[in-house]
Image (spheres, helix red, strand yellow):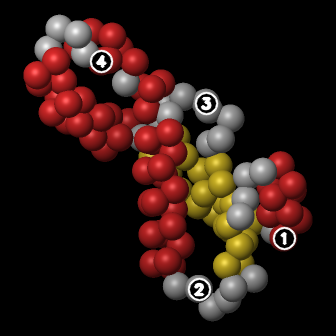
Amino acid sequence: MRYIRFWFDIGYITGADEWCAAYKEPIAEAIIMNDGENLFYQHCEDYSYLFMADFDENNEEDNAADYEEDYDSVYNDYIDNWCSWGYEDISEEEYMQAKEDGYAY
């Protein structure tokens, strides 16, 4: 088995900034990268209220017609310019602890 810890940085500490996974070997790096990217975008979506709060507060009522288009643009720009993710191999013990803590599948 190969044990991976994915980490996510969106500029805010959420308490859920990492996720662990176990893969049967051999596993292609492309699969790990795809899983990591999907988990990252889900993390961004789950916590977008943290980094989009100012935009919401300043724009939702004032420009209702353009809000959705502007929101998507600002959201994507923030993710592209301020957020990141990565992964590292971990030990089976670290994986089991993360699973026990609820941060692994």
Mark in the foreground, 4 or 3: 4
Instruction: Label 1, secondary structure: give it.
Output: helix
Position of the N terminus, as image quadrant, is: bottom right
Q: Residues within 10 Å of mark 1 (few under 14, many from 20)?
A: some
What label does residue 55 carry, if any? 4
Comes first in the chain, label 1 or label 4:
4
Q: Amino acid at mark 3?
A: Ile
Instruction: Label 4, secondary structure: give it.
Output: helix
Q: Residues within 10 Å of mark 2 (few under 14, many from 20)?
A: few
Out of 61 and 77, give the one closest to the viewer.
Answer: 61
Q: Amino acid at mark 4?
A: Phe
Distance from disc 3 to disc 1, alpha carbons, whole Å, reads: 25 Å
Q: Which residue is mark 2?
A: 27
Q: Amino acid at mark 2?
A: Ile
What label does residue 92 carry, if any? 1
2, above or below 18, in the image: below
Measuring from the top left, give residue 21's x and y in whole percent.
Answer: 68, 67
Name the side, left or right, on which 15 lies relative to 94.
Answer: left
Quarter holding residue 2:
bottom right
Residue depicted at x 25% and y 15%:
60
Distance from disc 4 to disc 3, alpha carbons, whole Å, reads: 19 Å
Distance from disc 1 to disc 4, alpha carbons, whole Å, reads: 42 Å
Position of the C terminus, as image quadrant, is: bottom right
Q: Which residue is mark 3?
A: 13
Measuring from the top left, give residue 100's x and y in whole percent.
Answer: 87, 55
Instruction: Label 3, secondary structure: give it.
Output: loop
Distance from disc 1 to disc 2, alpha carbons, whole Å, reads: 16 Å
